[in-house]
Amino acid sequence: MRANSKDMATEQVIGLIRFSILPKSPGAFAISKNKSSRIYKEALFDPQRLNKRFAIFETVTLPSLDGQVDKDFYIIICASTYLPEPYKERLEYLSSTRRYLTIRYFDDSLFMQRIASICVGDIQKSNRVINFRLDDDDAISFDFIENLKNVSSLCGAGQVITFQRGVYIRGGAAGRLDVAELNYPKIAIGLSHIRSSQDNSTIFDCGNHVKIDDDKVFNVKTPIFWWIRSVYGESDSRHLRDVFEKHKKISTHMSISCDEAASMLQERFPLIDFNQMQRVL
């Protein structure tokens, strides 16, 4: 239940992560393409797939959240009620050891927009909520939350904030990673939305992220890296099919050792083990 306005704080930051969720109309996910509901559900909850997703989530995403210099934020994992019990227990354990992390379960009767609105609304205690999206296999820099709050002070309700510079990383040969640096305005990683106390919308109501009206977007253009996108064969987003090959043609691309990746990226992502990242990708 939303708090009374007289009890509201000034601002909150709430991140939303979809973790093997089964929303109504899941067509945005490549894994759902040309599959019946039954076949899609079997593929989504296949143990081999889930083990890999957890390995990446625990190696890439969680360390980037654990390492935030500004600890005043919330993350809500939106998961499916159909998620097998051992994996629910694993999520619950991860949540129990992290103050910022909450798990919510939903069946397949709701669209993602409604799921996101429920999640944010249930813990909203402020007049303004900076809500952002993050996939369960990507990372944000250690100062992302801190800078998101700073930038949000320049934005009004309904505006969208994007941090355009980051890296794509794909597992390469043993001990190596393929890395592509690029500027990607309106990338979904960390894409944020300002929600007022009179508004029920979230970042998921903004539609296709690459088609958001430029007039509504505040683009942070700096030379430092704000995010890491993991690239691998089982990635769920249809947009990620062959995306590494596409983007390395228009960006700085290199094949480097894990130690070189650490030298390049550890300052921005201090808790990520790039040797472990190479193994799980």
Image (spheres, grey):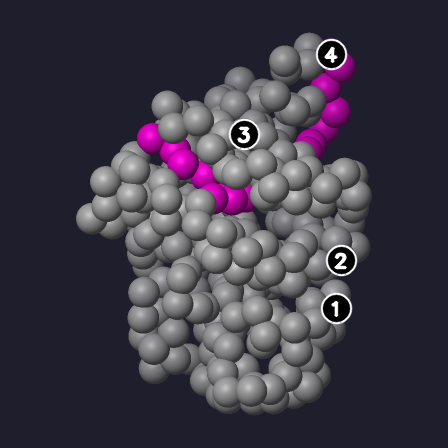
- Between the residue at mark 2 and the residue at mark 1, the CA separation in whole angstroms equals 7 Å
Q: Give percent across and percent down for residue 256.
A: 56, 89
Number of other residues with Cα within 10 Å of mark 4, as a class: few under 14, some 14 to 19, many 20 or more = few
Q: Nearer the viewer, mark 4 or mark 2?
A: 2
Q: Residue at x 45, y 84 (%)?
A: 253
The picture quadrant where one finds residue 86 is: top right
Q: Residue at x 32, y 65 (%)?
A: 241
Residue 77 seen from this side:
yes
Determine which residue is flagged by label 3: 105
The picture quadrant where one finds residue 174 is: bottom right
Task: Give, as a three-letter code, the residue at label 1.
Answer: Pro
**What's drawn in magenta, residue-wise?**
6-24
| Labels 2 and 3: the sequence-earlier one | 2
Task: Give, as a three-letter code, the residue at label 4.
Answer: Lys
Determine which residue is flagged by label 1: 270
- Between the residue at mark 3 and the residue at mark 4, the CA separation in whole angstroms equals 30 Å
- Between the residue at mark 3 and the residue at mark 1, the CA separation in whole angstroms equals 31 Å
Q: Secondary structure at mark 4?
A: helix
- Between the residue at mark 1 and the residue at mark 4, the CA separation in whole angstroms equals 39 Å
Q: Secondary structure at mark 2?
A: loop
